[in-house]
Image (cartoon, rainbow, N blue to C red):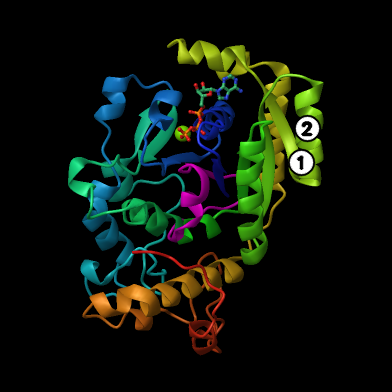
Amino acid sequence: MKIAFVGKGGSGKTTLSALFVRHLVDQRLPTLALDADINQHLATALGATDEQAARLPTLSAHLPLIKNYLRGDNPRIPTPDAMIKTTPPGSGSRLLRVVEDNPIYTACVREIDGARLAVTGAFTEDDLGVACYHAKVGAVELLLNHLLDGPGEYVVVDMTAGADSFASGIFTRFDLTALVCEPTLRSVAVYRQYRRYAQDFGIRIAVIGNKVCDDDDLAFLREQVGADLLCWIGRSEHVRASERGQTRPITDLETDNRTALTTIQSTLDSIERDWVGYQRHAVRLHLRNVAAWAGQRSDHDLAAQVDPDFIPGAVRSTRGAVLDTDRLVGVADAVADQP
Ligand SMILES: Nc1ncnc2c1ncn2[C@@H]1O[C@H](COP(=O)(O)OP(=O)(O)OP(=O)(O)O)[C@@H](O)[C@H]1O
Ligand SMILES: [Mg+2]
């Protein structure tokens, strides 16, 4: 199951992603953490030193390998360069389990204090002016679309701040979007913005209150976000200690905060993935991108990459077009993605 942590800058996305990952790892559950923020902090939040974090391999640097591996022998994708970030899997594509041996994980996943992590890669000088957030996280988008995660397996993604995370199609890829919200008007404003998108695209969001100090903070959040408030985390001495470089065991986290992590996990566990809807969304985004920008830039027929009979996670692959691509091409309400 896939969960993203989103919210206002500084609200605690990275902190809560790391706590949640460590909570899962402590239970020895199959878990993959992905840092999809271009300001990469998840590694250090998981306990890496700055030097270790700086030496991590990046997904964006391994994009050719990722594309080549994922396309497998899918005849609709003749070469790696025919693959764009939204190219959906089809018959012959390689789908990844959360834990397995494959060249992508070998190249890009590293263990930090027991947690398996892959990072997008920070923006470099070379990126300025030529790349943007959306291009940089293309590798994450491809991975998410090719991951065959089942119940009891977790993919935890630390997203970039604020509205940027819903400027790319990535935000539709999660079973649960955990919106980290401090008890402040500015944090609530980001929640409202996100909620509108969530409604438009049928995305399940849950607000996780963070840095909740007292009853007034809690009352404020309840009043502002109502039933979307799933649980909350207080100002944590455990987190503050990690800011001082002392990474304490997750079992030492304050009881109430630990309970909040359990609530997030049980909410995620209660969701049943609709693979048909999931693939349909991926296809819709892809065709939208092809029409908007990618089609003119490629020598390949990118729309033909859609395999209408293919549903990841489904044993069946019946003829009779599970995905009606003609209709999907015309869907006007799709997200306006960017290259
Ligand atoms: N529950 C908490 N208790 C104490 N400190 C916290 C808590 N949550 C977050 N912090 C602190 O708040 C600061 C911002 O947290 P964090 O880096 O996780 O936010 P973010 O949303 O990921 O920020 P960015 O938008 O820059 O990625 C950090 O110094 C972190 O230690
Ligand atoms: Mg962060």
Quadrant location, the C terminus: bottom left
Q: Residue at x 31, y 27 (%)?
A: 53
Vertical order, 123 against 81 (above or below)? above
Q: Is residue 148 rendered magenta in the image? A: yes
Vertical order, 151 against 37 (above or below)? below
Identify the element where label 1 is drawn: helix
Res. 224 mark: 1
Q: Are marks 1 and 2 in contact (CB under 8 Å)?
A: yes
Vertical order, 73 against 40 (above or below)? below
| Coordinates of residue 18 in the picture (x, y in percent) | 51, 30
| Coordinates of residue 247 in the picture (x, y in percent) | 48, 14
Q: Residue at x 28, y 33 (%)?
A: 56
Q: What's under tag 1, amino acid-wise?
A: Gln
Left or right? Give the position of 40 relative to 107.
right
Residue 203 in which image quadrant? bottom right
Q: Residue at x 34, y 54 (%)?
A: 139
Q: Which residues are magenta?
A: 145-168
Residue found at the far left of this picture: 126
| Coordinates of residue 209 in the picture (x, y in percent) | 68, 33
Identify the element where label 2 is drawn: helix
Residue 31 in view (yes/no)? yes
Vertical order, 192 against 114 (above or below)? below
Residue 148 in view (yes/no)? no
Residue found at the far front of this picture: 185
Q: Residues within 10 Å of mark 1 (few under 14, many from 20)?
A: some
| Coordinates of residue 272 in the picture (x, y in percent) | 68, 57
**Residue carrying label 2:** 220
Left or right? Give the position of 237 relative to 326.
right
Q: Residues within 10 Å of mark 2 (few under 14, many from 20)?
A: some
Q: What's under tag 2, amino acid-wise?
A: Phe
Q: Is residue 48 rendered magenta in the image? A: no
